[in-house]
Image: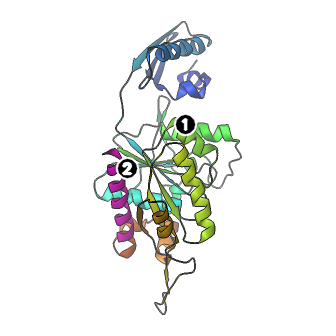
Amino acid sequence: MDEKTLFEKLPASLQGRVQSLTARDGRVTVVADVAGMDAIAREQLEAALKDVLGAAEGVAEVRVAMVAERTTRQIIAVGSGKGGVGKSTLTANLAVALARTGRKVGIVDADIYGPSQPKILRNEGKRPQAEGNKLIPVPSEWGVPVLSMGHLIEPGKAIAWRGPMAGNALRQLVDADWGEAELLLVDLPPGTGDVQLTMLQNFKPAGAVIVSTPQDLALIDAARAMQLFEAGGVPILGMVENMSGYECPHCHEVSDPFGQGGVEAAAGERQLPFLGRIPLAMSIRSSGDSGQPPAAGEGHEAECFAAIAQAMMAALDRQGS
């Protein structure tokens, strides 16, 4: 029986602990991460791995090696309770802005049903390789590796999965071979459903960034997302106001079709950092469609994303101090 089939026989609770699995001549060797587990839990993990794998056809012996290495990689979730407020655009541009400063950053496109990072980062049609039971993220020309369901399914194909399947997909994306990446930005789907719960239960983020447009309806949904993170013990690093102000390209008059200042006011009420605002700009929309993140260039929009990235990292540093 091949290694992939053996790994898939394990329940999700065990898969998340397996760092590597090799099989040769009837002998299976598993390297398991036991960080944070006491002696009894380690014994139970070893027994469970041996029970499941030892029952597989052709397996004569199972060896379990336990390691307790602690990774320094941090996860930052980018979320909002509402769709269409710019989570994916913000995530991609924050990652690019951070990469320009020398940070090793990766992106997990956790919007399982509506993945968009492959288009934003212009690596559509590429497929991730795999090494053992781990995926290898797809590189982008902006120095930011990314993994998305958009890399694993045919372009334009709808994903009709129930919650547990979406949770398993998220685990594979996060628990990939991210190499030197010290920071993972996770582009969450709208709402507070299965993907968010799986994230909190299996890969607790070091912090969360909440993005919203200024109007009250969007802020109501953003508040729900914050409540979920706070209930899960995830600190809110701050809030970002998107689509804040629109400059007419013809007369250059600035208007506020979605209002302005609502997110900053909400952050103040909750005593949270306000990380900054992003204008409603045609250039941001067109660059997203063409796979040219504004943060990779120059100008006002690039400066906005760079400033928000800097503020986010400052908030993250404060959480760790």
Label 1 SS: helix
Quadrant in the picture for the N terminus:
top right
Residue 43 at least partly seen = yes
What residue is rendered at 38% in x and 57% in y?
Answer: 312
Viewer-nearest residue: 20 or 271: 271
Residue holding disc 1: 201
Q: Is residue 310 magenta?
A: yes
Instruction: Write the residue at 48% across / 60% down.
Output: 270
Which residue is depicted at the point 48% across and 25% down?
18
Amino acid under disc 2? Val
Q: CA distance from mark 2 to mark 1?
A: 22 Å
User: Going 46% across and 57% down the picture, which residue do you hit?
Assistant: 91
Report the label total. Answer: 2
Q: Name the residue nearer the viewer: 267 or 92.
A: 267
- The region drawn magenta spans 303-321
Q: What is the x, y in percent for residue 132?
A: 47, 28
The answer to whether 294 is drawn above or below residue 154 in the figure is: below
Main SS, magenta residues:
helix
Q: Position of residue 254 (x, y in %)?
A: 48, 86
Going from the N terminus, do you reach mark 2 or mark 1 first? Answer: 2
- Quarter residue 2 falls in: top right
Residue carrying label 2: 105
Q: Report crowding for label 1: few under 14, some 14 to 19, many 20 or more residues within 10 A (C-alpha).
A: few
Closer to the camera, 245 or 315? 315
In the rendering, at what x and y percent does residue 320 appear?
33, 45
Q: Nearer the viewer, residue 15 or 197?
A: 197
- Relative to 200, residue 248 above or below: below
Is the C terminus in the top left, top right, bottom left or bottom right quadrant?
top left
Identify residue type, mark 1.
Answer: Gln
Mark 2 element type = strand
